[in-house]
Image (tube, grey):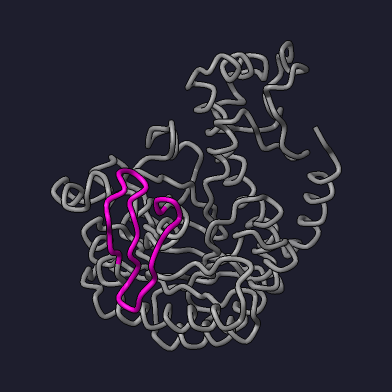
Amino acid sequence: MKIKYELTKKDNNARLGKIYTNHGTFETPMFMPVGTLANVKTLTPEQVKATHAGIILSNTYHLWLRPGEDVVKKAGGLHKFMNYDGPILTDSGGFQVFSLAKNKKKDIKEEGVYFKSHIDGRELLLTPELSIQIQNKLDSDIAMSFDECIPYPADYEYAKSSTERTLRWAKRGKDAHQNEKQSLFGIIQGGAYEDLRKYSAIETVKMDFDGYSIGGTSVGEGKTTMYKMIDDAIKYLPEDKPRYLMGVGEPIDILEGVERGIDMFDCVLPTRLARHGNAFTKEGKINLKNAKYKEDFSPIENDCDCYTCKHYTKSYIRHLITSNEVLGGTLLSIHNIRFLVHLTEEIRDAINQKNFQEYKQKFIEKYKNNIH
């Protein structure tokens, strides 16, 4: 079946909902951990599930290059290949083409994007049709349209031309989509220009996708600009379909997105921070490499219910990190993902009780006013 979205309650623009998929139901707002190469870095599927993440994201570009979409299809699809039975969303590969192409050199044509593989320098062409065909074979629950992630800053004429091309690519991808069990989301672009965001949103909605995402944010612009990008697009998106803000995972940004009506978020941030010894806490991020944690035998957070906080101390995790032990990154990844998932759980409770604004203000005040 295609996904089904149910809007259950609103608190101003903040939305409480459920998304039903072939691999389970999850509540929104929700944070999605990123499983780049068919795994959330350093974690087993069981460890991911223990964070209570409702859905994870995997990367079309990376799986196309290795092991190849045909290998995944022969394994029975992405769920069986990676032994994960929960909902999975695959991105289109567009962002990776623009961020990882060898030497960042790429040639954007109407047919698609010519670029060199970041692995071996091979000349490649990724088209809207190929992106969808790869995702059809991966058999994720939700596939994404192929788009160009407009860099920031970009002049108006470039942004306009790119936005129009992304719309043409969206139509071509939708026409190429053949997996009847898989839902397809359209992506809103437009750069930092209000009229282009409006145009992109209205024209994308006309194509009647199963959900809509706002792309091209968190690409170097300031926070005020990013939030305006959301505002400029979201007012034109339908109430009865999910809304996804791509590549955003800072706690305050999640709160700002929810306030504007966003349902889904994803980001590599929790696992990337973990690999560098950093942890989310309600009083801001901390760096466990700091010498003051050498003899700190308390958990990262006393009231955290994650596996890491229940069993390990800052001192031990610091020892692992400073000794370059992989387990350190694993334990911090568990905590950081659980932190963001728990944040969305508390957000859902606040929306349900009609006090989201109060919750947001209290969280931000505590998070921003404590520097470690």
Q: Is residue 289 magenta?
A: no
Where is residue 158 shown, x and y percent of the image? 54, 79
Residue 72, placed above or below residue 290: below
Q: Residue 331: image x %, image y %?
A: 54, 26
Q: Tell me the quarter of the image containing the N terminus.
A: bottom left
Quarter of the image with the C terminus in it: top right
Which of the two residues, 100 or 332, is positioned nearer the viewer here? 100
Residue 109 covered by magenta stretch: yes
Residue at 70 percent of width and 32 percent of height? 303
x, y percent for residue 282: 74, 40
x and y percent of residue 75 in the render? Answer: 16, 45
Horizontal side, residue 95 vs residue 335: left or right = left
Q: Determine the image quadrant of residue 350.
A: bottom right
Total number of numbered discs in the rendering: 0
Q: Is residue 75 left or right of residue 334?
A: left
Q: Which residues are magenta?
A: 101-126
Question: Within the image, what quadrant is residue 320 found in?
Answer: top right
Q: Nearer the viewer, residue 141 or 279?
A: 279
Q: Front-most of 337 and 310?
A: 337
Residue in view at x 53 percent, y 18 percent: 324
Q: From the viewer's perspective, is residue 354 above or below residue 296?
A: below
Q: Is residue 147 above or below residue 88?
A: below
Residue ID at (58%, 81%)? 197
Which residue is pictured at 43% across the width and 88% down the height? 206
